[in-house]
Amino acid sequence: MTHCERVFTALEGGVPDRVPLFESVFDEKVMRGIFPHCDYYEFNDRIELDVVGLNRSAWRKDNVDLIDEERGLFRDAWGVVRAFGPENTPYPVEAPIKEPEDLKRYVPPDPDHPDALGHLPEVAERYKGRKPIIWIGRDAFFNPSYLRGMEQFLMDFVLDPNLAHELIELCLDYDLRLTERAIRAGVDIVVLGDDYADNKGPMMSPAHFREFILPGLRRAIESARNAGAYVIKHSDGNLWPILDMIVDAGPHAINPIEPAAGMDIGEVKRKYGDRVCIVGNVDCGDLLSNGTPDMVREAVRQCIEVAAPGGGFMLSSSNSIHSSVRPENYLAMAEACRELGVYE
């Protein structure tokens, strides 16, 4: 099978020739520890990844105007002040909507701006039809929480629900429009990347998830599917209290089934494998960062043993290939996937 045939078959719940190797984000240090001097796209081809994306390159340090060079602070297109840390994605440190009145004056970014798609057109020209192109999109949680601040946004669910709904609607107007543009530009798979949980459980009650987040998640999935893309719902953490609702929202796949958060991939497969593709779940925290290649290989074997039967499975890390991952461990993971993931 081609990369496209392999991935699309798995996303539709079928049995491909082998388990696809999936990943959304790679740290440059890890890539160059495996193949020195390569960029993401050379690495992607040489490691034989089955999907390709932008690798969040919009967050390059040479691509922003710093407002505080010593602290590495910059203001993104939403007006959120962010700081560069050791990972690909800078973290938010200051929200622009500090008071409800601020929302009346707030002007969101333009989803039709020529730069909003980044270098997606170049990626599509290089890979369209050869590898599935992925796009990391948003649903109803991350962008509103960045505008208000995570804690305050969650408090708004109780103290000012109208404001929470207004923030969600404002962000969805942008995110759905931009994602539709990305699909028209060549994206095959939308990864909705909003994380809802930590290792103990969701950051909001199931009732609040149902009221505030679920409607936007459904709209994001429906919009992307109607535009012709597959949808993978990504969220770290322990999702068990809300996983039924997430699956009911209609994604083609769920990811990353984080083992450190109590998300047993075998149990997820048994409960939901007839409805969604399972994408996961080699531990990128302790195992890929501190383990050995032999330990990684055994984890891949176990993942494939419990999640691959019957198809509808793609192998990935439990979040991303971040800066602490040992290059030799990711190489072992990729090689084990190709060797052990063949369907007889």
Image (cartoon, helix red, strand yellow):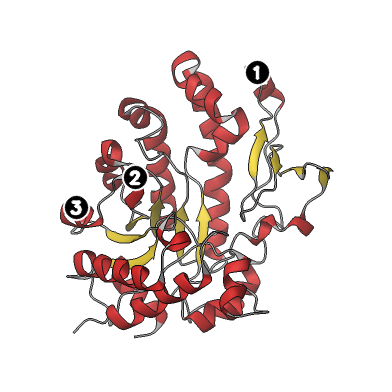
x 45%, y 70%: residue: 329
Name the residue that disc number 3 marks.
267
Name the residue that disc number 2 marks.
261
Answer whether labels 1 and 3 touch (C-beta < 8 Å): no
x 49%, y 74%: residue: 328
Cα gap from disc 2 to disc 3, whole angstroms: 13 Å
Q: Position of residue 58 (x, y in %)?
A: 67, 58
Quadrant of residue 6 in the image? bottom left
Cα gap from disc 1 to disc 2, whole angstroms: 34 Å
Task: Give the amino acid type for the residue marked by disc 3 in the picture.
Answer: Glu
Quadrant of residue 304 in the image? bottom left
Extreme-top residue of the structure: 159
Name the residue that disc number 1 marks.
99
Q: Nearer the viewer, residue 180 or 27?
A: 27
In the picture shown, does residue 64 fall above or below 22? above
At mark 1, the secondary structure is loop
Image quadrant holding the C terminus, namely bottom left
Cα gap from disc 1 to disc 3, whole angstroms: 43 Å
At mark 3, the secondary structure is helix
Q: Earlier in the sequence, mark 1 or mark 3?
A: 1
Task: Give the amino acid type for the residue marked by disc 1 in the picture.
Answer: Glu
Q: Position of residue 171 (x, y in %)?
A: 56, 38
Q: Position of residue 94 (x, y in %)?
A: 68, 31
In the picture shown, does residue 213 fall above or below 187? above
Q: Position of residue 271 (x, y in %)?
A: 17, 51
Can see residue 181? yes
In the picture shown, does residue 343 fall above or below 304? below
